Amino acid sequence: MKTKKTKAPAIDIGISGGERTKIVEGLAALLADSYTLYLMTHNFHWNVTGPHFNSLHQMFMGQYTEQWTALDVIAERIRALGHPTPGTYREFVRLASIKEVEGVPKATDMIRHLVAAQEATARTARELLPVVDAANDQPTTDLLTQRLEVHEKTAWMLRSLLEQ
Ligand SMILES: [Fe+2]
């Protein structure tokens, strides 16, 4: 006996298709910035040198580990909203507001780059808040709020290292 092919039912969670598309565009930008920030932090964990090597190496590890976990949450929210998620370097470069850092900066310049990238990621998350509020999309609001808290706190901690 032949089994019938079943088509997956259309997504119907109370958020219109147009609103879901707009939210997904913002989440894709956030994922791209988050991935770029993650990779920058891991790169600096590997390449940092100087008298504060140990504390910066450890601090960067804590940061990139947290960011790595967040990437999955952002990508899977995109999937739950019914869209494919970007997942290639080419797409991340196109979508990210953060520029990659060439070469190996000095430790204090690494910290400056990370402050800027943390703040850029916070701005990308914040820009999306009015869109998700208007669509009554509380799970995405919750996700954005959590990411904002982490990026703003981490930017403060990194900036504190630069104060004399
Ligand atoms: Fe390591």
Image (cartoon, helix red, strand yellow):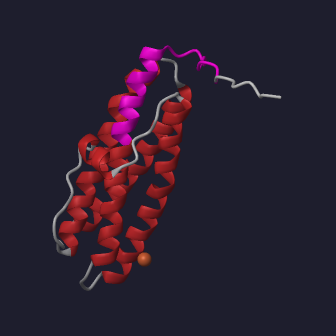
What is the residue that sits farthest to the bottom in this orientation? Answer: 51
x, y percentage for residue 113?
22, 60
Instruction: Give the left or right position of residue 61, taking residue 155 as reference.
Output: right
Instruction: Give the left or right position of residue 56, taking residue 143 as reference.
Output: left
Instruction: Give the left or right position of residue 121, taking residue 24 as reference.
Output: left
Instruction: Give the left or right position of residue 159, taking residue 34 as reference.
Output: left
Name the quadrant containing residue 144: top left
Q: Is residue 151 above or below residue 49?
A: above
Q: Name the foreground residue: 144 vs 158.
A: 144
Q: Residue at x 31, y 38 (%)?
A: 124
Magenta span contains residue 7: no
**Ligand 1 image position (quadrant):** bottom left
Instruction: Name the quadrant of the C terminus.
Output: bottom left
Q: Name the foreground residue: 18 vs 123.
A: 18
Name the quadrant containing residue 5: top right
Instruction: Name the quadrant of the N terminus.
Output: top right
Give the residues in magenta: 8-30
Q: Is residue 36 above or below residue 78?
A: below
x, y percentage for residue 130?
38, 22
Q: Residue at x 46, y 57 (%)?
A: 68
Q: Is residue 155 visible?
A: no
Q: Main secondary structure of the magenta part?
A: helix
Q: Residue at x 42, y 15 (%)?
A: 18
Name the quadrant containing residue 108: bottom left
Q: Name the foreground residue: 73 vs 8.
A: 8
